Amino acid sequence: MPEYDDIQEAQAGADIERLLDRLTPDTPSGRSVPVPPQDAEALLARYGIHTLPVLPAPDPDTAVRAAARLGYPVALKTTAPHLRHRPDLGGVRLDIGGEAELRRTYAELTDFLGSPEELRPVVQSMVPRGVDTVVRAAIDPAAGAVLSFGLAGAPSQLLGDIAHRLIPATDREVAEQIRSIRAAPLLFGWRGSQPVDTAALAELLLRVSRLVDDHPEVVGVDLEPVVVAAHGLSVLGATVRLARPPATTDLGPRRLPVY
């Protein structure tokens, strides 16, 4: 389990306590609550997990200002829950190169899919193309904290091609986890495609593992999609859930010791 000099464990712990005091004044122990997006991004950044900024675009003029701030080209995306897993509906438009194109795309989205209030559009910078993946951590009632990895979209959602490891995970376990999914060849240059940066992906998995292991109040982390490019990766979406841990008498380790 490698150490990272940029991890701010104590500051993250203080952030979590403040968030729990603010978000769960009347919530029973063990019941989780979602962390607001900006707070989730700040908490993840304490562990060197940086998400790509998104700017709200409730109307075309705001979308244009957001794109000017981020710099073209940009992506225009809907964030409505009912469209999150429906890429076939065209709720994500990429490589928008200028103001006129952005205004035209915004009008197409709202004409076809619904009002801005329903769609909750956002603007985000474009990132280098790569393989879309998903990284999750959650608490299993029987096994404890579990780290999960798969390719985003049909491989994980339809085929269940997801690999799991117990937290805390080691560098060897994470390397095996990445290679154990059936779609792993897509990461390593399948049919002449360019291999992606699996070293950066392994580091991300280890940082998520460390966050959840250090802070039992973090009961859910969902990074999707994580676009892994030839050099580096980009976390485009992130959610975090917190809960005050319930009282427990099981103080033993989650795994057998290795000698």
Image (cartoon, rainbow, N blue to C red):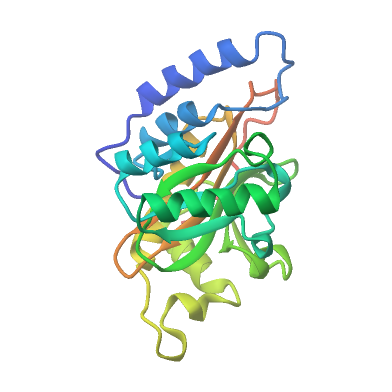
* Residue plotted at (61% across, 16% down): 23
31 to 55, vertically: above or below: above
Examine the image and state in which quarter residue 161 appears: bottom right
Residue 33, how many percent across, how many down? 66, 26
Residue 74, how many percent across, how many down? 39, 53
Examine the image and state in which quarter residue 187 appears: bottom left
Residue 108, how many percent across, how many down? 59, 54
Answer yes or no: is residue 148 visible.
Answer: no
User: Given the current orientation, which residue lies at the most extreme bottom position?
Assistant: 191
Whether residue 31 sits left or right of residue 244 in the image: it is right
| Foreground residue among 33 and 11 | 33
| Foreground residue among 198 and 223 | 223
* Residue plotted at (40% across, 30% down): 42
| Foreground residue among 164 and 130 | 130
Examine the image and state in which quarter residue 89 appears: bottom right
* Residue plotted at (40% across, 52% down): 100
* Residue plotted at (47% across, 26% down): 39
User: Given the current orientation, which residue lies at the most extreme left position?
Assistant: 5
Answer yes or no: is residue 6 visible.
Answer: yes
96 to 237, vertically: above or below: below
Q: How many marks?
A: 0
Residue 91, how many percent across, how many down? 61, 55
185 to 171, vertically: above or below: below
Whether residue 194 sits left or right of residue 21 in the image: it is left
